[in-house]
Amino acid sequence: MNGDFKLIRDSLNNEKPIVISVAAAGDREVIRTVKAAGDAGLAEAILVGDREDIKKLLDEEDVSFTVSIEHETDEEAACQKAVGLVKTGEAGLLMKGLVNSSIFLRAVLQGEKETGSEVFLSHLAAFQIAGFNRLLFCSDGGMNIAPGLAEKVRIIANGVEGLHRLGIAVPKVAVLAANEKVDSKVPASVDAAAIAEMWKEGQFSDCLLEGPVAMDVALSKEAAFHKNIDSRIAGETDFFIVPDIQAGNMMGKALIYCAGAKMAGLILGAEYPVVMTSRAENAEGKLNSVALAAAIAKGEKNGI
């Protein structure tokens, strides 16, 4: 796995396009994403929403290929219908359109509940950053607000499985805290140490995990050397586990606005990947998220 979203998109070009079910699809950026994905041969789409609004946007954006439209004007019903299309196998991915996240996720959870699936949803962000030869992944900066130890364990499990499906056979995982010292006054460090002990006992398969780890050590072998820390992941971390949603949100925005990073984001934990980007995200970011989700959907454990 290298650090370029374009190469992920290119890797999918020779495969049959995946079908995306889009909930509340009457949004210009969504239509632009569908157009870009269709033009690139990555995906086809079933658009669920107000038919007239969607047709108008398709015409205005000059979408020349045929797109299926499922008419539904009610947001909640549109989300439920979009989820149903994935559950029945008519689509392989679910994508959020112009609808509140809580309404959208409620439909996802209800769909899983109806089929008896035990589900824990978490957000996975991927960053393409100049100077790095790999994508950097972060969780959970977009869904679980203040996860406790049990929730962090499931966040890691979701993410590691996703990275396996992207071809990262043994992801290097850093459970982040302010520094490497375990301090009862810093709950993140206590959780990280507990998770590292679970890893030593074999709870997490096919990954290399350390914690607590400070961000400088996770990113730099030199930092680990100067701090006299013996680390097997320093400077090579693939997957960063943040203490809470605030830390993940700040990390992501800093990378985007200060380092010029490109980001893709999706929800893991359901029976299918879920593309859920910000309503303010541009079409390129949405397309990167579609490509990432498609690669995970089509990938097998330990390789695509």
Image (cartoon, rainbow, N blue to C red):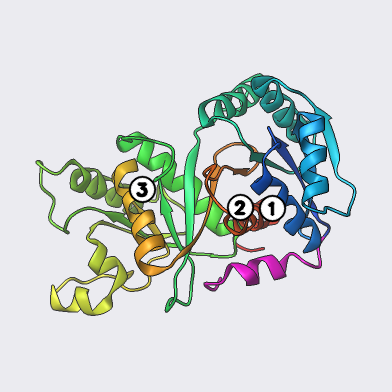
Q: Position of residue 220 (x, y in %)?
A: 28, 74
Secondary element under disc 1, as helix, strand or loop, is helix
Which of the two residues, 10 or 1, is positioned nearer the viewer here?
10
Tell me: 291 left or right of 155: right
Image quarter where the N terminus lies is bottom right
**Of the image marks 2 and 3, the number of the one nearer the N terminus:** 3
Residue range highlighted in magenta = 1-15
Q: Which kind of residue does numbered mark 1 sit on?
A: Thr
Which of the two residues, 2 or 200, is positioned nearer the viewer here?
2
Q: Position of residue 154 (x, y in %)?
A: 43, 40
Identify the residue at image location x=65%, y=41%: 95
The mark found on residue 1 in the picture is: none
Q: Is residue 164 visible?
A: yes
Where 290 sits versus 71, above or below?
Answer: below
Identify the residue at image location x=65%, y=53%: 290
| Residue highlighted by disc 1 | 33
The answer to which quarter of the image holds residue 291 is bottom right
Identify the residue at image location x=48%, y=44%: 123
| Residue highlighted by disc 3 | 249
Of marks 1 and 3, the one in the foreground: 1
Label 1 – label 2 distance at C-alpha: 6 Å
**Of the image marks 1 and 2, the number of the one nearer the N terminus:** 1
Tell me: 23 left or right of 141: right
Image quarter where the C terminus lies is bottom right
Q: Is residue 87 magenta?
A: no
Label 2 – label 3 distance at C-alpha: 17 Å
Q: Position of residue 223 (x, y in %)?
A: 20, 75
For the residue carrying disc 2, how many other residues have a C-alpha within 10 Å: few (<14), some (14-19), or many (20+)? many
Tell me: 188 left or right of 68: left
Q: Which kind of residue does numbered mark 3 sit on?
A: Asn
Label 1 – label 3 distance at C-alpha: 23 Å
| Residue highlighted by disc 2 | 286
